[in-house]
Amino acid sequence: MSIILLLILISITVAIVFLLAFRWAVKSGQYDDTYSPSVRMLFDDKKKKNDGSAVS
């Protein structure tokens, strides 16, 4: 019976750690930008055309 209590305490501790990490991520602004990821794939970077004047 004591092992069950130990496992419950460990799982509650892990859950609290994950909750605190999530709250820290939200407060630090990690989830502020909700628009850019949805349209990022629409604006592909275009490759510059090499006109031959630059010698590498």
Image (cartoon, helix red, strand yellow):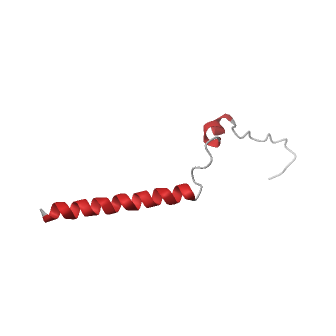
Q: Does residue 3 appear left or right of residue 43 in this picture?
A: left
Given residues 9 and 54, the one toward you in this image is 9
Q: For the point 19% across and 62% down, which residue is it?
A: 5
Query: Residue 35 at x, y = what percent?
Result: 64, 40
- The quarter of the picture where residue 34 lies is top right
Could you tell me how many numbered marks the image carries? 0
The answer to whether residue 18 is left or right of residue 39 is left
Query: Is residue 21 positioned above or below 55 on the image?
Result: below
Instruction: Identify the residue shown where x is 61% and y is 49%.
Output: 32
| In front of the other: 52 or 39 | 39
Residue 15 versus residue 53 in the image, above or below: below
View extreme (right): residue:
53
Identified at 85% across, 49% down, the residue is 54
Image quarter of residue 42: top right
In the rendered image, the residue lying farthest to the left is: 1
- The percent coordinates of residue 20 (x first, y second) are 44, 61
Q: Nearer the viewer, residue 50 or 14?
A: 14
Percent position of residue 12, x then y: 31, 60
Horizontal side of residue 11 vs 3, given as left or right: right
- Closer to us: 28 or 42: 28
Looking at the rendered image, the quarter that the N terminus falls into is bottom left
| Residue at the image point whose x is 56% and y is 58% from the top | 27
